[in-house]
Each structure stands twice: as C-alpha cells, then as structure tokens.
Amino acid sequence: MSPKPLVKIFSGRESNYLAEKIADSFGIALGKTEVIEFSDGEIQPSFEENIRGRDVFIIQSTFPPADNFMELLMMIDAAKRASARRIIAVIPYYGYGRQDRKDKPRVSVAAKLSANLLSAAGLTRLITIDLHADQIQGFFDIPVDHVYASNIFIPYLKKLKLPNLVLASPDTGGTRRAASYAKAIDTAFVICYKHRTKPNEVGEIRLIGDVEGMDVVLVDDIIDTAGTITRAAEVIMKEGANSVRAFCTHPILSGEAINRINESAFTEIVVTDTIPLRNECDKITVLSTADLFGEVIKRVQNYKSISSLFNIKKK
C-alpha cells in the first residue's frame, strides 16, 4: 500500500497571521508562496515548493477587498494545475455569507455565487467556522466541514464564573444560536427584537425576557458596525442587568464600530481571530481559532470523524 500523501498548508496574504498558528498547531511549517503584484493591480500567486500528489490546505478569509477572494481562487486553480491530490480551503470568515437568499427583487445571491466560483476553481473540500446561515453548506456539491466557535467560547465563558448568567440574542435571527449556548451551559436566554429602517441602521430594539439582576452574555456570529449589539447592550442595562458582555465570532468592525464599543455599556466583547483587528480596543478580547482548525485538519487528513466539532455540546 502506498503511503498517505503529505500535507502542505499555505496561506493567502491577509490570513498569514492565523495560518502560521494553524500550521504550528498541526505540527508543520507553513508552505512557501509568492504573490506578484503588477502595476495595473493584477496579482499572480504561486506555490514556491512541490505540491504534486499532496493534500493542499489553503487558509484565507474572504473579507473585503475582493482581491482576498480572487487570490484564494487563483491559489486553488494553481494547486489544481500543479497536480495537488486534494485541495481544501480553510475559510475562517466566509465573505458575502449574509447574502444567502433573494430578499428583494433583482439581487444576487452572492453566497451561492461564491460557492459556485470556489467549486469551479477546483476546490475539493471546505472548512469554515460559524457561517452566517447553515443553509450555505447546501450551496456546495463538495464536503463542507462547518465547525462552531462554541468550542472556544463556552470554556472561556465558564471560566468567567458569572453568578447570575443569562444568554441573549441581539436579534430574532440569532435565537437558535442563543438557545443552543443556553442549553449547553444549562441557563436561560432572552431575545432582543429589532426593527431595521435600512441596512446597517437599527430603528428600535425591544427586550423579550427578564434580565434584572442578571449578568447577560449576547452571542452572535458577526459584529460589523456594532450598531445593533451596542443598542441591545444599552437596552439590557436599562432593564436592570448587572453587566453585559458579547461573544461574536467574526470581528468585521467597520465604520464607527470601535468608537461605539468604547462608548458602550459592555464590560467585554469576546471575538476570534478569523479577521484581524484593525484597531486596538481595551474592551475586546481575542481568542484564537488556530488549535480548533489544526485539529480539524488532522482529522480530515487521518480520515477521522469531526462531527463532535460540528455541534454546540456541553463541556
């Protein structure tokens, strides 16, 4: 029997900070790549070592600018043309994931378009964490390993030993996530109901549930402009909560997000390193996904089950 193909881990430029930690967790050095930038703005990524017959893992989040996504597509294509055995993309933050349905006439379902492009480029497997909508997995005709940040967040939350803990969702769309966390740590949860006047602008937030005297933890997959979540924190504190924190997987933090967080009622906001922080903030704590992704890569390579990482489970 021929030996199993060797693993090679590479990274796009914007996720190099995380890829180095993932490769170290897996136990190998990060592979060598080069990206040539032409004067007109085009890029040309290349692998600077042999990948023929290897299992190639390419780590790249696809947050803006669009070059990040294009660079990932070109690396997948290059790996295919270099005769890689399998090409697995590790996309910690799946960009355009919020455009997962046709919510008004004449718009693109960009999350599906992205899936089509990745498959057309030659991708054979996808690994990601906390997709904005679980249905995105069905946009692919290749295996998708969708793990959850609860594997990182829940142990940290338990270490806080909050005396009167209650979970909360910043909007009705996150109710299922909040309920899953609450079940995992055996506590209650409340819901914030919001009405948007237009995208990225919140009109009104109302609280469903009692938080008086409680230590409230909001859970969400994305924190973008921080408008919704800081307004939710304000409402929660006005309803008599002792403290309010938030656990959000992907720290997009666009626009005035950092300023809003600094001026908010939050004691702490816990995020992961799927997206690098552009600005420092004393209220933000960053937990690494490196060991979690390293473990997933090990299990994929060794044909072991990773189902235990798919679900929010009691620790």
Image: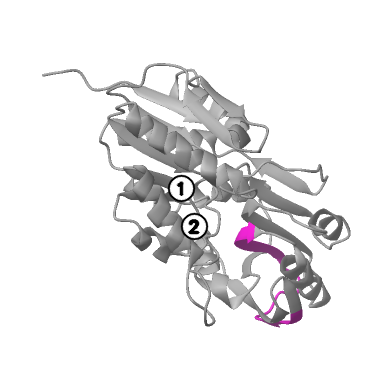
In the image, is residue 315 above or below residue 39?
A: below
Q: Is residue 222 above or below residue 191?
A: above
Residue denoted by label 2: 131
- Provide residue 285's location: percent of width, then percent of height: 72, 44
- Which disc is residue 216 wearing? none
Say if residue 88 shows up in the picture.
yes
Determine if residue 295 is in view: no
Q: Is residue 212 magenta?
A: yes
Q: Residues within 10 Å of mark 2 (few under 14, many from 20)?
A: many
**Residue 128: mark in rendering:** 1
Q: Is residue 229 left or right of residue 176?
A: right
The N terminus lies in which quarter of the figure? top left
Residue 77's spot in the image, x, y percent?
A: 39, 37
Q: Residue at x 31, y 42 (%)?
A: 124
- Residue appearing at x 56%, y 28% in the figure: 21
The three-letter amino acid code for the residue at tag 2 is Leu
Callout 1 touching callout 2 (CB < 8 Å): yes
The x and y percentages for residue 289 are 55, 39
The number of callouts visible is: 2
**Magenta-drawn segment:** 203-222
Which residue does the image show at 86% across and 56% down from the upper left?
Answer: 259
Element marked by disc 2: loop
